[in-house]
Every structure is written in structure tokens, then in C-alpha cells.
Amino acid sequence: MEYEAGPPTRWHLTLRDGALLELWADGYRVEDGAYEFSVLVRATAEEQAGAEVLARTPADPRRVMVAVARLATASVQDVHTASAPARDGACACRPFSWEE
């Protein structure tokens, strides 16, 4: 599989239990009570068989949206792109560290 929309965006999800989940995806939607994150890729039929394909482009059957993660909305407190920095250059949801 190859990314079709360039490198995915970095997302942070703060879970209701206080845990921070980081994942990479082109975007998300809320579907059936869950956040569904996905990426646009170019994949062979064999590669698609091993993934959950959410959508296909009509003009090119190799361009598909593939599920990356699915989390119940009830378990998530906050979702935001981690690329939106705070004043110190770090994501606003956690302390900044040069060691990351």
C-alpha cells in the first residue's frame, strides 16, 4: 500500500480514563457511535483483501479509504490534530519534551 494523500496527519485522542492515544490518519468520521479513522491509499486487490476498505474511488479501483482505528465515542473525551502547537511548540494536551 502507498499513501495517496501524502503522509497522514497525527491525531491525539484523550480517552475518558485519562489515557492519551496517538494515531496517524487522513481524517475521521463519526459512524454508528464510533470515531472511524482512515487513510487514502493505493492498494492492490490482494492488499485490499487484508484491510477494511471503507470506500472506493469509481475511476480507479486501487484507490481506497482504509480503516486505521475505530473507537466508541463514549470512550473518547477529546480529539484533535497534534500538529496544532501550543506556544512552546508542543501539542497543548501534554507537556513539551525535547526527548520525543
Image (tube, helix red, strand yellow):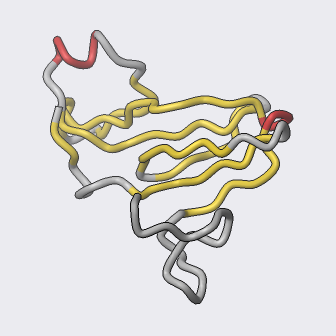
Q: Nearer the viewer, residue 72 or 29?
A: 72
Vertical side of 97 occupied by 36: above or below: above
Identify the image quadrant of the N terminus. Answer: top left
- Residue 68 at x, y = what percent? 45, 32
Identify the image quadrant of the C terminus. Answer: bottom left
Q: Nearer the viewer, residue 2 or 86?
A: 86
Vertical side of 68 occupied by 6: above or below: below
Position of residue 12 in the picture relative to residue 45 (left or right): right
The residue at the point 60 percent across, 29 percent down is: 70
The quadrant holding residue 86 is bottom right
Vertical side of 1 occupied by 80: above or below: below
The residue at the point 28 percent across, 38 percent down is: 58
Vertical side of 51 occupied by 36: above or below: below
- Residue 57 at x, y = what percent? 30, 40
Q: Residue furthest bottom?
A: 87
Position of residue 21 in the picture relative to residue 100 (left or right): right
Position of residue 62 in the picture relative to residue 8 (left or right): left
- Residue 6 at x, y = what percent? 23, 58
Label tally: 0
- Residue 33 at x, y = what percent? 79, 32
The residue at the point 59 percent across, 36 percent down is: 36
The residue at the point 28 percent across, 10 percent down is: 49
The quadrant holding residue 64 is top left
